[in-house]
């Protein structure tokens, strides 16, 4: 009884070749030393809109493809003929005159005669356009997902009215800053950070007198003024209705007070024109430093106490 491999070996080579060349979905071709076609699969002829595979014999890629594409293929084949080294998994891009783009995954090999002499090349190529389109769609989808995540990150950390960082991000940033300070301390280095709490004086009266839209504009304008008043290393937050905070890293209490005083003065000297209303503003400010207390909650409480002390002492002050 014959084994399966004995049967396969008994098949005529011509039958095997014809079966492959007529039925393979991948294009298969054989070329001579001048890169002219000498044998082609049916799929290859269909790709070139040829009714008969014999129509390709003696022709070259230049007869079907753009010059740039054909030149690259020719140079690759001549390199294979020279070196005997196959080129596998080459990604090729074919731009048709109508603008359609076709992508191929191609592999090219040296073609040997019975004496092991290179007499040309042969190769296969597979249309991977659907795969490339899927990859491009996936890349685009990932870009959109990244943008959406960035927008969500902004929404979760930013105050919608002022554009400043919000209350949640204030505490997150303080925690990171404190952890960094502790690491420096453990390494033998000292570090100090300060916070400034700012409250708009008589803000309720502004809302009651001019309306909430004007009040919203006041919040926005104060936020802009604060951002312009701080360093790039500082961070500004809106942590409540009319309450703002500034975190200053590597800043002593005295230096933070100087910044706070500058802000107080600028607010007082910068009246706002909103909907034909000239609005004069002042702020009450509290300042505290990590050199005074260790825990974040204690630091905020100390700064908050000083801010309200500024209010009790007549407003428009820094404490």
Image (cartoon, grey):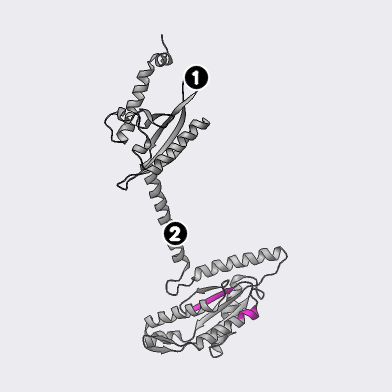
- The span picked out in magenta is 238-256
Q: Tell me which residue sits at (57%, 78%) in the image.
A: 196
Q: Is any atom of residue 85 visible in this view?
A: no
Residue 238, x across and y down, in percent: 49, 75
Query: Residue tagged by mark 1?
Result: 115
**Mark 2 touching mark 1, by CB under 8 A?**
no
Image quadrant where one finds the N terminus: top left
For mark 2, does the 10 Å Cα neighbourhood hold few (<14), some (14 to 19), or many (20 or more) residues? few
Question: Could you tell me how far apart the alpha carbons at marks 2 and 1 are, in whole angstroms?
Answer: 63 Å
Q: Vertically, is 250 above or below 46?
A: below
Q: Tell me which residue sits at (33%, 31%) in the image.
A: 56
Q: Which mark is residue 268?
A: none
> Which is in the foreground here, disc 2 or disc 1?
1
Find numbered disc 2 in the image and state the secondary structure of the residue it sits on: helix
Hey, which quadrant is residue 234 in on the image? bottom right
Q: Nearer the viewer, residue 259 or 52?
A: 52
Q: Vertically, is 47 above or below 239?
A: above
For mark 1, does the 10 Å Cα neighbourhood hold few (<14), some (14 to 19), or many (20 or more) residues? few
Q: Which residue of the protein is positioned furthest toward the top in this rendering?
A: 1
Q: Nearer the viewer, residue 234 or 180?
A: 234
Residue 166, x across and y down, in percent: 48, 71
Image quadrant where one finds the C terminus: bottom right
Q: Is residue 241 magenta?
A: yes
Query: Residue tagged by mark 2?
Result: 149
Q: Is residue 114 magenta?
A: no
Sequence order check: which comes first, mark 2 or mark 1? Answer: 1
Q: Nearer the viewer, residue 51 or 90?
A: 51
């Amino acid at each position: 009884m014959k084994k399966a491999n004995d049967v396969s070996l008994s098949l005529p080579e011509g039958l095997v070749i014809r079966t492959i060349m007529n039925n393979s979905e991948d294009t298969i071709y054989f070329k001579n030393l001048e890169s002219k076609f000498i044998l082609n699969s049916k799929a290859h002829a269909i790709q070139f809109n040829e009714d008969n595979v014999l129509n390709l014999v003696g022709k070259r890629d230049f007869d079907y493809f753009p010059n740039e594409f054909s030149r690259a293929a020719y140079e690759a084949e001549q390199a294979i003929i020279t070196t005997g080294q196959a080129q596998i998994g080459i990604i090729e891009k074919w731009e048709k005159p109508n603008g359609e783009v076709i992508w191929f995954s191609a592999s090219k090999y040296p073609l040997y005669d019975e004496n092991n002499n290179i007499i040309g090349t042969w190769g296969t190529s597979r249309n991977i356009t659907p795969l490339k389109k899927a990859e491009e769609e996936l890349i685009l989808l990932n870009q959109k997902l990244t943008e959406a995540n960035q927008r969500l990150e902004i929404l979760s950390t930013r105050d919608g009215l002022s554009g400043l960082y919000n209350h949640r991000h204030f505490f997150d940033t303080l925690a990171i800053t404190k952890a960094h300070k502790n690491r420096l301390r453990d390494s033998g280095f000292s570090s100090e950070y300060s916070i400034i709490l700012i409250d708009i004086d008589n803000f309720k009266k502004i809302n009651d007198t001019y309306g909430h839209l004007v009040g919203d504009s006041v919040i926005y304008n104060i936020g802009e003024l604060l951002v312009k008043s701080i360093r790039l290393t500082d961070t500004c937050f809106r942590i409540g209705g009319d309450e703002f905070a500034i975190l200053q890293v590597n800043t002593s209490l005295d230096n933070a007070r100087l910044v706070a005083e500058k802000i107080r003065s600028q607010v007082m000297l910068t009246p706002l024109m909103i909907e034909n209303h000239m609005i004069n503003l002042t702020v009450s400010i509290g300042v505290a430093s990590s050199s005074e207390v260790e825990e974040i909650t204690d630091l905020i409480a100390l700064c908050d106490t000083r801010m309200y002390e500024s209010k009790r002492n007549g407003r428009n002050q820094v404490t």
